[in-house]
């Protein structure tokens, strides 16, 4: 975020051509005055919306029929005069005017044009593999450049994805590339290729004309393990001058989405932006307003993860910003402004690397999200990484549940462990699905295959985790059968039920109770590696069993001993430790999302924490320890490499600066 504008707005304007009074109340002075009062310093403004309407005089598109003036030009001129940065929003995949050309529409496997059946009220999806349509996008881009050169800082292209298009052009293209059009897996590969080539063409086109501007594509940037580098998300990053993570915590995204994505995409990036919305639910939710506590929580989360803030809004058709909305945004952005000097140029300190189990072209995140939740609740600092990452940056690697392994990854893991690194692997992580062989030799196990029981049970040895000993805990999801290698230590044992439940063999409401131990290990330690036979991370995401988190915590403590941060903070608190030059900055966040309605999690209150102890491994005695905002100095003690202090109050978000 070094030098990046921290307080941004993404201003939608998807306005039906039937609305009669577009821009009738727009006043450029009031527009920028409202933004400045809310402490906004950058905004994405619309040139063309999903309805296909342009908001400037165009020779290539269709200007909104009710708009009587150059709204884009008026906005850009006013923003430039007020010193507020601007990016141009331009939709690609949804454009109802262009969608009237049926040859440009996507065709899905059922033959539906644009993905919209008769009488559905949705925008039709355009195929980005149509050269003539992409030519139009580039020509309209040139039109905007020529009209407004010098008045904006970048382009923001939206809806940059394909949805399994099997139009005639895409089928021919797949055949030419040696792909099978009828194979859903090959369709996904083709979607990826089309989008990558679209991004490359548009990016190069813009950069040839305006080398210094930003270019962003709102495309699928799911974390993946780069197991197939030809289809890895990281190939898209070279066509993005900045990374923006659209994450409105509604029924679609939720509160796990942003930390998962930023922990992967934000690694090493100095230009990362988090985007939420002022809406109660999501885009286009007119007449709603996000709770102040929710907006605080989401924006503070962004800066603690090294991202700038961007709040999504939609301008009323008449062109006047909603005063109440911007009062709410201003309440939060004034707090961001007080903190941002301690955000610019900072980098996250992470001692755990979670090797994402997600494959390229997939979105199966249960195991990753389970690891995310556990580590957040246990207050370990971590990154989400892929197989190409530098493992030596981390003291511990976690391989959650189903990390596929080939000879290259196996050799890299061996070198990492030989160099002093520690690993926790669960269930099928380390297995080569192509051969069925288990390749992670340092795990100290012989992999025998899937367990024949589901659910099954785990019995923990007292020396491993005393408070879990003495009870057989249910493991809800199918794990693996393994045999411990000679010299390996068994930390827990598998237990079986009387029977698996079937239609004619069942007991009580759910599964059979514990019968006896099988003699097979459930947790094995071999040197600096702990292997757990159950898919604990994915199971934690689904079931939330505290014992699963306790097992992982005991494993981490056994392997690492001391860590960057020690505290008596509750699991509901979130933490991040960052370095900015010679200082360390500890973020602590305490808001509690609640599922108090059917559709989404709600944040509408702050619960302060009082007199909480924290110890940060600073490695030297700091000159001072201060709270931000306010720079109030705190008493501290330094011993054994740790700076120890008590925080009198944590009310929402605090930053502790160690100078």
Image (spheres, rainbow, N blue to C red):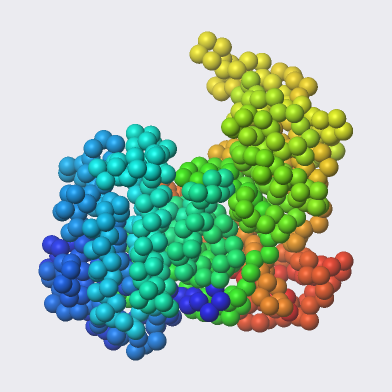
**Viewer-proximal residue, 162 or 78?**
162
The N terminus lies in which quarter of the figure? bottom right
Residue 386 lies, with reference to residue 321, above or below; the image says above
**Outermost residue toward the bottom?**
81
Taking the image as shown, residue 259 lies to the left or right of residue 518, namely left
Residue 163 in percent (x, y) is at 34, 46
Q: How many marks?
A: 0
- Which residue is pictured at 66% across the width and 15% down the height? 498
Residue 582 sits in quarter? bottom right
Residue 466 lies, with reference to residue 592, above or below; the image says above
**Viewer-proximal residue, 150 or 564?**
150
Taking the image as shown, residue 546 lies to the left or right of residue 421, namely left
**Viewer-proximal residue, 290 or 132?**
132
Residue 78 lies, with reference to residue 595, above or below; the image says below
Taking the image as shown, residue 471 lies to the left or right of residue 641, namely left
Residue 611 in percent (x, y) is at 72, 66
Residue 507 sits in quarter? top right
């Amino acid at each position: 975020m070094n030098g990046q504008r921290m307080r941004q707005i993404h201003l939608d304007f998807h306005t039906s051509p039937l609305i009669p009074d577009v821009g009738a109340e727009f006043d450029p002075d009031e527009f920028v005055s409202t933004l400045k009062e809310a402490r906004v310093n950058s905004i994405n403004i619309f040139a063309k919306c999903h309805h296909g309407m342009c908001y400037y005089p165009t020779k290539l598109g269709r200007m909104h029929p009710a708009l009587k003036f150059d709204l884009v030009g008026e906005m850009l001129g006013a923003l430039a005069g007020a010193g507020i940065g601007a990016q141009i929003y331009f939709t690609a995949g949804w454009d109802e005017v262009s969608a009237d050309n049926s040859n440009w529409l996507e065709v899905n496997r059922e033959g539906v044009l644009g993905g919209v059946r008769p009488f559905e009220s949705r925008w039709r999806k355009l195929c980005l593999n149509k050269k003539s349509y992409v030519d139009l996008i580039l020509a309209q881009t040139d039109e905007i450049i020529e009209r407004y050169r010098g008045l904006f800082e970048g382009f923001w292209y939206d809806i940059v994805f394909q949805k399994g298009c099997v139009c005639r052009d895409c089928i021919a293209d797949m055949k030419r590339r040696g792909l099978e059009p009828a194979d859903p897996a090959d369709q996904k590969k083709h979607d990826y290729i089309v989008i990558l080539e679209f991004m490359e063409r548009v990016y190069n086109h813009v950069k040839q004309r305006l080398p210094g501007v930003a270019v962003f594509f709102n495309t699928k940037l799911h974390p993946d393990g780069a197991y197939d580098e030809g289809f890895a998300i990281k190939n898209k990053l070279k066509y993005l001058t900045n990374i923006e993570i659209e994450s409105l915590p509604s029924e679609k995204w939720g509160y796990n989405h942003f930390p998962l994505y930023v922990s992967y995409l934000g690694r090493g990036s100095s230009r990362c932006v988090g985007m939420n919305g002022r809406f109660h639910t999501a885009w286009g939710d007119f007449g709603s307003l996000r709770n102040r506590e929710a907006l605080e929580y989401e924006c503070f989360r962004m800066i603690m993860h090294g991202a700038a803030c961007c709040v999504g809004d939609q301008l009323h058709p008449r062109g006047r910003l909603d005063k109440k909305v911007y009062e709410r945004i201003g309440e939060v952005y004034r707090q961001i402004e007080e903190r941002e000097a301690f955000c610019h140029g900072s980098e996250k300190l992470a001692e755990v690397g979670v090797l994402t189990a997600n494959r390229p072209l997939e979105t199966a995140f249960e195991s990753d999200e389970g690891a995310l939740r556990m580590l957040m609740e246990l207050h370990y600092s971590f990154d989400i990484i892929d197989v190409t990452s530098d493992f030596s940056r981390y003291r511990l690697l976690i391989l959650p549940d189903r990390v596929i392994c080939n000879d290259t990854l196996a050799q890299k893991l061996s070198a990492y462990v030989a160099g002093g690194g520690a690993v926790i692997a669960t269930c099928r992580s380390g297995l080569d699905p192509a051969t069925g062989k288990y390749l992670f030799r340092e795990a100290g196990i012989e992999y025998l295959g899937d367990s024949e029981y589901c659910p099954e049970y785990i019995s923990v040895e007292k020396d491993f985790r005393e408070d879990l000993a003495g009870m057989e805990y249910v493991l809800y999801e199918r794990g693996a059968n393994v045999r411990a290698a000679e010299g390996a230590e068994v930390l827990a044992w598998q237990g079986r039920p009387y029977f698996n439940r079937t239609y004619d063999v069942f007991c009580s409401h759910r599964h059979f109770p514990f019968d006896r131990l099988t003699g097979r290990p459930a947790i094995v330690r071999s040197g600096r590696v702990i292997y757990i036979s159950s898919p604990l991370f994915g199971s934690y995401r689904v079931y939330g069993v505290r014992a699963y988190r306790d097992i992982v915590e005991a494993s981490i403590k056994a392997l690492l001993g001391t860590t960057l941060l020690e505290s008596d903070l509750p699991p509901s608190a979130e933490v991040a430790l960052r370095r900015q030059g010679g200082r360390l900055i500890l973020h602590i966040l305490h808001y509690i999302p609640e599922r108090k309605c059917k559709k989404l999690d709600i944040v509408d209150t702050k619960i302060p924490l009082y007199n909480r102890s924290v110890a940060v491994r600073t490695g030297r005695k700091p000159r001072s320890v201060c709270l931000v905002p306010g720079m109030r100095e705190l008493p501290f003690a330094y011993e054994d490499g740790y700076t120890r202090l008590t925080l009198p109050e944590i009310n929402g978000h605090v930053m502790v600066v160690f100078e």
